[in-house]
Image (cartoon, helix red, strand yellow):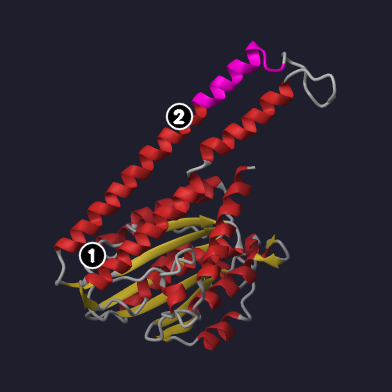
Amino acid sequence: MENPFTHEKIEENMNVNVEIVLDASGSMVKKIGDKTMMEIAKESIKQVLSEMPANAKVGIRVFGHKGDNTASKKDESCGANELIYPIVDLNVEGIEKALEPIQPTGWTSIAKSIEYGVEDLKALDGEKTLNILYIITDGIETCGGNPVEIAKQLKGENTNIVLGIIGFNVDANQNRLLKQIADAAGGYYSSVNDADKLTGELYRINELAFSDYKWEVLNDNLIIRVKGMHNEILTFNKIAYGNKGISEKVDLSTAILYGGISKNDPKFAGLYVSLGKVSKRLSELSEERKNKIDAIFEEEYNKIKKESEEYIAYLESRKGEMVAYVPSTSRVSPRSAYYTGTSNKGGTREDAKKDAEKIKAEKEAAKQ
């Protein structure tokens, strides 16, 4: 089985070292809702670490936490790139205490963060070791470094380090430049703009770090677990998106109705005779559009379903082999490690349903 980011073979019983780098530049003082971005980031880190596997080693590095964001204090701020908590056995309370006094104040030094973070992790490198370097930042390099070149070196050295970058509430240009850094290292990049999405992206560390990187016999039970998760995801998407065509047609039918002439309702636009030629033609076009949407969805759904069936068939052909099973921490699927107790948190199918409904509502709100 492959690591989902590096595409390298997952080793048995891997040791996991994680370094999270937090941006403490002045712009992290901005508020999203009633909390600063720094407060949100600290809370997200704490939440995710509380569900990390106990055998993980985790450290915290921060930058921009000294000086300020004025030109006179730039050198002091850019020089402030500090491992405030060493990469040792996971201690959530210790990390929380180390983060507590850190306040947003200075400039952004991403290049040094990658360079120093790699050095920190290399010092712990050994056999069967997975090293994860994750950077949370709300901006691009402002300290004169070249993070893309540093990231290229990381990839060129063929180190066993996974680089992840999360752009927190960044604009389009910052988003593009941060993605270039991650791409240069063969790493992962995502952009988020609120607390829930930041926490969700940080859970990707858990996806990599879960101690279930252990070899299991590929038996019927394991195949059923994988197949069940595939089916749940397919069903969720069919429910969430399968009725888009009819939903839009209902909206268009309402618009067509109110575009006509009405003697009794002044809200009607009066553009054409109700149920006349224009109205009927608009209804025909609406029906054609619905059919096209339905056809596109059906084609894509069948394509994904076919890929799923082929993958399950491939697994069945390998029954009896020893394989590495990587658990999902999805909050949508009740079969995931988030709900089945791997993270010691747990939940119910009803919790999963509520999470799925929340995600669907957020997507609908984003379209408005």
Any part of residue 120 in sight: no
Q: Which residue is mark 2?
A: 292
With 129 as the anchor, is 36 left or right in this view?
A: right
- Indicate yes or no whether the magenta region holds residue 275: yes
**Residue 131 bears which disc, if any?**
none
Q: Residue at x 43, y 52 (%)?
A: 179
Q: Main secondary structure of the magenta part?
A: helix
Q: Percent from the top left, x then y, of residue 137? A: 53, 62
Q: Which residue is mark 1?
A: 8
Q: Which residues are magenta?
A: 274-288
Q: Amino acid at mark 2?
A: Lys
Q: Which quadrant of the rendered structure holds the C terminus? A: top right
Q: Amino acid at mark 1?
A: Glu
Q: Percent from the top left, x then y, of residue 330? A: 45, 66
Q: Nearer the viewer, residue 331 or 366?
A: 331
Q: Nearer the viewer, residue 7 or 252?
A: 252
The crowd level at tag 1 (other Cα within 10 Å; few <14, some 14-19, many 20+) is few
With 251 as the anchor, is 213 left or right in this view?
A: left
Placement of 32 over or under 47, stated as above or below: above
Any part of residue 250 in sight: yes
Q: Residue at x 73, y 25 (%)?
A: 258
Which quadrant would residue 123 be assigned to in this image?
bottom left
Front of the two marks 2 and 1: 2
With 59 as the anchor, is 269 left or right in this view?
A: right
Which quadrant would residue 38 be assigned to in this image?
bottom right
Placement of 336 over or under 148, stated as above or below: below
